[in-house]
Amino acid sequence: MEKGKVWLVGTGPGDIGLLTKRAVEVIEKADFIAYDALIGDEILGILPDHAKLASVGKRSGEHSADQKDINRMLLEEALTGKRVVRLKGGDPFVFGRGGEELELLVKNQIPFEIVPGVTSAAAVPAYAGIPVTHRDFTSSFHVITGHPRKDGQDRIDYKALVQLDATLIFLMGISKLGIIVENLTRAGMAPEVPAAVLERGTHACQRRIVSTVGNLKADVRKADIQTPAIIVVGRVCALADRFSWYEKRILAGQQIVVTRARSKACSLTERLREEGAQVLEFPAIETRFIKPEPVVLNVLFSVPKGKEIWITFVSPMGVEGFFELLAAKKADMRKLLSTGAKLRFAAVGQATADELQRYGWIADLIPEKYNGRELGRLLCRTAEADARICLIRAKEGSEDLIEELERFGRKFENIVVYETVYKKNNPLVDRIREKIEREEIRWVTFTSASTVKGFVLMAGNMDYARVQALCIGEQTAREAKKYGMQVTISERSSISSMIDKIIESREII
Ligand code: SAH
């Protein structure tokens, strides 16, 4: 069997925006991914479904699963020919034990690549408004491990550090904070020198304690600091208030779960991130095209000359599915036009109409309120009595529309082009459950009843009363209420309206 390859990938300190392009490329093509506790939630949310995942780290700063076991796991997977990706927080070679993981690979002649990452040593201070160097204050910065060696020996030369009069950054040092400041003071550092502890930097919940060498320990104890955190010592810390920016963005500090199918989640996710929210993509459903029976297609092509055919779309996905279907039959719109029938398009809402326009066709009819009932009503009013109404739809759903057509005694044809499949096994599930229990998630957004169902199927047993559900449409809201979620409905059935709601209610946390 051909040997695989290993990529040692730094993911940055948490914020997905700091993941490099190269890291994304490598992740997308991985067969096997091993990750540890420092990997940001947003990043866990994009790991591809096709990859086998292994979580190899305990949470909260403890040492990860036995290093030897991890080394062996990477080797074994590579030996079976897989593309193996080892994800690490920050940069893999900055206190990341990257070197150790390479030893066994080199010995076994497994090819590998390193993808550097943005190290927390630089990014976490930057997100806290602390420039690690500044011409007026310091001309160098130094990154130091606060973790003593196994033999307990501390090899750090504190005297030398103090003489540098530089910015000192300690990683893995929180549990040894007392010893570190004591050593610095003993080596001659003035207690008034500014110092800071930066907790969970680049994450929505990041905090900073800015103090002095003399008071840092007491201030940190009061604040009950969690890991991971770094210690920064030096005059640049005094700039933090002036240069702070992270918390000033509109949705700073908000963690929002997006449950749409991944392919459709982008615009919502992107816009929320743009405003400073931390967005956890947790796709609860996936949509798959299905090929309708060939006879179904005759429905489209057999409308007599001069009669109306209303091709009715109830979702953007339906539009895509419809054109896929034509393409699969090697037919294009000319075939539909050649029947001589009067071709009409109806769309349930603007997003669906926009999708239609991408294919070069303009919707003749969009209801003012984007829902199936309104669409049905409008269609019945507009379509000629003997028009053929074709519903391009998912296998499930569209009940409201159908009920409405039936109420008016209208005949219609169903052309089912896609189905919804519920997702399983998302690596984020435990973290999301934990965050909901702790009420850290501001919103879980649902764009359809099926996303609610899919979410509940994945999340399992949980206190759903702690879920703040932001829903598009009544049907979605009804489904969310079934589980006891706290429900808010966006004014209009659109992503923009959802975003407006999130922004509008940001103060009331
Ligand atoms: N390779 C990593 C560092 C690994 S050592 C890097 O380049 O960033 C782990 C230490 O990194 C933690 O104990 C903590 O001190 C620091 N750290 C990592 N991510 C952090 C974050 N988001 N916020 C604060 N400190 C972080």
Image: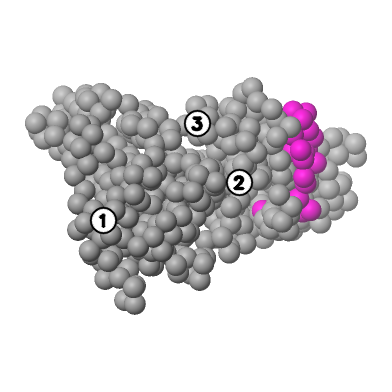
Would you place residue 49 above or below residue 197 in this image? above
Q: From which residue to which does the magenta span run? A: 473-495
Q: Is residue 52 left or right of residue 402?
A: left
Quarter assignment of residue 353: bottom right
The amino acid beneath tag 1 is: Ala
Residue bearing the label numbered 2: 256
As helix, strand or loop, the secondary structure at mark 1 comes to: loop
Residue 59 or residue 306, whichever sits in front:
59
Residue bearing the label numbered 3: 426
- Whether residue 305 is visible here, answered yes or no, is no
The amino acid beneath tag 3 is: Asn
Ligand 1 has an atom within 8 Å of the beta carbon of the residue at disc 3: no
Would you place residue 53 above or below residue 43 in this image? above
493 magenta-colored: yes
Q: Which mark is residue 423?
A: none
Q: Which mark is residue 187?
A: 1
Compare marks 3 and 2 and give the one earlier in the sequence. Answer: 2
